[in-house]
Amino acid sequence: MTIQSSTSLRAVTSYDASLKPGFIDPVFDAQAVFRASLLATAYPGRVVSLDRSFTAPRPFSPATAALCLTLMDFETPTWLDHQTSCAEAAQWLGFHCGLAVAEGPMAARFAIVTDPLTMPRLFEFHPGNVEYPDRSTTLIIQVPSLTEGPPTAWTGPGIKTSATVGIGDLPFWFWSDWDLNGELYPRGIDVLFTNGNALMGLPRTITVEA
Amino acid sequence: MSASITTNHNDSGYNFAYLDEQTKRMIRRSLLKALSIPGYQVPFGGREMPLAYGWGTGGIQVTAAVIGPDDRLKVIDQGADDTTNAVSIRRFFETVADVAVTESTEDATIVQTRHRIPETPLKEDQILVYQVPQPEPLKKIDPRETETRKMHAYGEYGAMQVTLYEDIARFGRIAKAYDYPAIVNGRHLMSPSPIPKFDNPKMENNPAIQLFGAGREKRIYAIPPYTSVRSLDFDDHPFEVQSWKGCCALCGSTESYLDEVITDDKGSRMFVCSDTDFCNTRQAEKTATAVADDQASGEEA
């Protein structure tokens, strides 16, 4: 790993001086970010802050970029929305994650959405199949706010009674599509919302009343 | 080379927590999907560990993917912190991850367990990792995974009810005392690993995160916090846990799971708590209050 790190540092300087670095400490940073995403998935509706920050490539927030470095690699075909695929983030993902890019949302294990208002409908992503519901797409949606949007009531596993959450700037059809997603259970997509340096999980088991 | 990169490496030559980063990412992705589908067994690329199958390789891989330098790890085997399996796994993580270890359930951030859930109630943000020998509750009904996978896919769990009913027809009660099947989140039938059925009610609405790893079978599953876990039963034969006539011979507890200990060749025996941390804490408290009482009465005289 030491050897690998040194070659990657050299490659950065010779390849593209503007390419932003990844984790400073790949092992412990990835572990800390994973723990945050584990908590976010286990306790949906809670804002989980990352305790480390780094410079993310445009248009990513630090939390989005950190999740990508933690969870994605050549094994996870990932769909990028238009705003991401045109920006420096696409090159950054290719370099740091060795990311395989998926042809469309239906072929994606992960999907990164940085501009939620133009995102595809939820049924366009892969819901997994009935014998392997774990093969569905995990959406990472970067939103302008996790708390100041229109309030919604979340209930389900991981939430003791119910949680009030205000995700900002989602398309108008989002929560009605989410109801349909719930009807596919155990199939269905899962979502991680990110904003700045914080994240919030929305697994398929959660019922949302808008 | 920056100093922060070299901190990843200790003298042992292993990556932090033994597994390489690629493997950890793969396990981490499986863990997130497992939490999203409570009770569903997510297949994962289980690695060979420096330990024989059946000794907790699945639990170790889950712990290795989750653990960080700030964690405090507790490992129990049949409730005890000082048995072979617990000691060797605790030493393993002390060596490869250099993490703090503890025997106290309260202080631990991660508890890896074989065959028991600690008596002390768990708190939010704590993680309980189970070592699972056989993750498939339907294996004895149909050994073919193609079939059991379909049964899970369509929620066809009638055959499991029938095996429990056969017990009632033969013995007048459900005879299964450990690895008692439960329905998680009203949907997936799950093997809770060979914990006594005494511990089944503790899984329900537990504030902690429960992760299950099966190394040989290469499956990971999970119960998120505050999730319904219903042990299978019948209206006229409701689920009930074991109870004992006496109390723990060491700490006097009447609420904990008791192990029978044979004390000599003449058949003498005693019942003691299987959870050593729970028992030791209670004994220490008792001694402390006894000493305090002695002092108080001494002052009066």
Image (tube, helix red, strand yellow):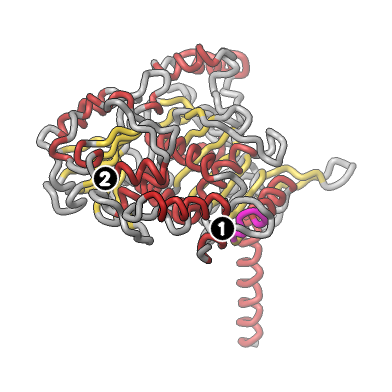
Q: Identify the residue at the far right of this view.
A: B265
Stretch in magenta: B94-99
Left or right: residue B118 versus residue B269 is left
Q: Please say if the residues under marks 2 and 1 sit with CB atoms less than 8 Å apart.
A: no
Q: Nearer the viewer, residue A123 or B249?
A: A123
Q: Which mark is residue A115?
A: none
Q: Chain of mark 1?
A: B
Residue under numbered circle 2: A193
Percent coordinates x, y for residue A102 in the rendering = 33, 29
Look at label 1 and name its amino acid: Asn
Percent coordinates x, y for residue A204 in the rendering = 30, 33
Q: State whether residue B132 is above or below residue B255.
A: above
Residue under numbered circle 1: B8
Task: Identify the residue at image location x=32%, y=37%.
Answer: A203
Q: Is residue A82 visible?
A: yes
Task: Identify the residue at image location x=56%, y=56%.
Answer: B105
Secondary structure beneath label 1: loop
- Cα distance, mark 2 to mark 1? 30 Å
Q: Is residue B223 visible?
A: no
Which image quadrant is residue B101 in?
bottom right
Q: Chain of mark 2?
A: A
Percent coordinates x, y for residue B106 in the rendering = 53, 59
Residue B103 is inside the magenta segment: no
Secondary structure beneath label 2: strand
Look at label 2 and name its amino acid: Phe
